Amino acid sequence: MARSRENVLVIGAGMAGLAAASRLLEAGVEVSILEARARPGGRLATLDAEGLSIEAGAEFVHGTPEPLWELLARAGIATVDVGSGQVDVGTRASEPSPASEPSLAEMAEILEAFADADGSVADFLALPSTQARWSPEARARAATYVESFHAAPVALASARGTARAEQGASASSESATFRVQPGYGALVRALAAPLGDRLLLDTVVTAVRWERGRVEVDARTYPGARMRTFEARAAVITLPIGVLQLPAGAEGAIRFTPPLPEATQHAIASLGMGPVVRVVLAFAAPFSTGPGEPTFLHTPGEAFSVFWALPGKAPRASGSPTMLVAWAGGSNAAALSGRGARAIADEAQGVLARALGQDEAALAARCTGAWVFDWLLDPYARGAYAFITAGAEDAADTLATPVEDTLYIAGEATCSEAIGTVHGALRSGHRAATQVLVLRTLDQGPDGPYAPEGRYPREGA
Ligand SMILES: Cc1cc2nc3c(=O)[nH]c(=O)nc-3n(C[C@H](O)[C@H](O)[C@H](O)COP(=O)(O)OP(=O)(O)OC[C@H]3O[C@@H](n4cnc5c(N)ncnc54)[C@H](O)[C@@H]3O)c2cc1C
Ligand SMILES: NC(=O)Cc1c[nH]c2ccccc12
């Protein structure tokens, strides 16, 4: 077995791991990247569904975060503006009506006001001063938004942390939302290509033994047959927080020897991993979701609290949508999770039928496909994305602090300014790579263990 002490191991080939590995490789550091799945990308997963690209995980580019746009531009990948149509339907069958501007504006104010609040989102919404200032509709809208899009139960989510995440997800003054036209999978392919056979798929990490300046990682192949040990000077660990939170001994838990420092363990335990159930429904014929073909159709109070249309393929592109996403996050998703694809798809169709005032059986008969993504059940994610819980506002920064200059934890959950996003994951990977590279420059010098053979001229050579 090849053993090398010069390299850096990157655990996980999602956006954070791919970004870290690419940076390190560009800087001349020899890296190996260990990925449990049979594909790179992690929570970026574009599937082919009836000839259309659909996302199982992330779909949107939130705002114009510079490093993500730079990557897209470098790879020549186009984006499309999603649009901002918002339509509300009540819990009872009714005609969808455009979301009222005042209630949207009030909700934006509430999300901003979270920034100055201690405690949870639920605490803030229950304050007499909050109730006096904003309408019940706006408060309910804010709660539903946090539960669904931040995937965070309002009783747990930090108000200040949510304000920060919200700002991070906007990432620009005009908070437009975009789609990656060919799907995020195209970006994953562009990032993974230069890594070649340094990217090891079907490699499930089971244990990390470490001491300052030395890491040993045990891994098995998916069926569990082959064990391998990898050795390196340092490891960038991009495991989702849901995986790091697994109790010792649980299926899929990774054993750290010695255990991670108390502060790191505490930070891991105190972050939340938000659940999401995402269903893509396909309809054979053009399908109308209401006036002006809205982008987002809100169904508050239902198990799926928001729906949106996916761009169709020609010749339907100019017509009504034929593919819709049904989205449940936070407490709703936790309640749906584990009920099975059939029951979850039926529930999504039922909510949609009620929302549009249509007959449920007739709508179901027109549905030609349903793809169900229940992220809490994903063994290599254990949820959709992280959220900051009340009292744990510093946890992401704690995780981003290198452990003994040897373990560098990255991933979306470690990016305090854009937690839960693709660009947050990307930034965390770049940050970890920089931490590794700075260490090389300061502590190791050009002849140190990170220096690839022949990269630096030796004196007298
Ligand atoms: C349904 C959904 C919708 C989302 N929507 C958006 C959106 O619209 N916009 C947005 O910006 N963000 C969105 N996100 C969040 C975004 O997808 C994530 O923040 C980002 O992709 C996380 O990247 P990462 O590298 O931190 O983690 P991951 O992509 O999870 O990468 C970690 C990698 O580690 C691997 N791994 C796990 N266990 C092991 C092990 N034992 N051994 C080896 N490897 C292992 C995993 O397989 C994975 O590939 C969404 C996420 C989900 C789930
Ligand atoms: N569908 C989404 O955009 C989900 C999402 C991921 N991270 C976020 C942060 C803020 C708002 C939404 C999100």
Image: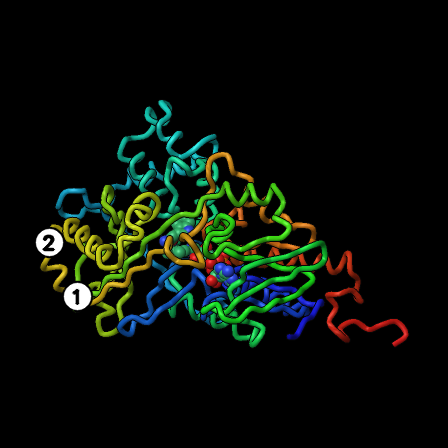
Q: Quadrant of residue 59?
A: bottom left
Q: Kindly tell me whether residue 47 is visible in this rendering.
A: yes
Residue 186 placement (x, y as % from top left) = 43, 71
Q: Residue at x 63, y 45 (%)?
A: 261
What residue type is disc 1 on?
Pro
Q: Is mark 2 within 8 Å of ligand 2?
A: no
What amino acid is at disc 2?
A: Gln
Element type at mark 1: loop
Q: Residue at the spot x=50%, y=72% of the render?
A: 190
> Counting other residues with Cα less than 10 Å from the Cα at mark 1, is it few (<14), some (14-19), or many (20 or more)?
some
Instruction: Say if 14 sits above or below 249 in the image.
Output: below
- Check disc 1 and report the residue beneath it: 286
Quadrant occupied by the N terminus: bottom right
Question: Label 2, on which residue?
Answer: 358
Residue 26 appears in which quarter of the rendering? bottom right
Q: Is residue 91 left or right of residue 267?
A: left
From the viewer's side, name the closer residue of 116 and 279. Answer: 279
Secondary element under disc 2, as helix, strand or loop, is: loop
* Residue 108 placement (x, y as % from top left): 37, 40
Compared to residue 40, the image places residue 354 above or below, namely: above
Q: Nearer the viewer, residue 16 or 202?
A: 202
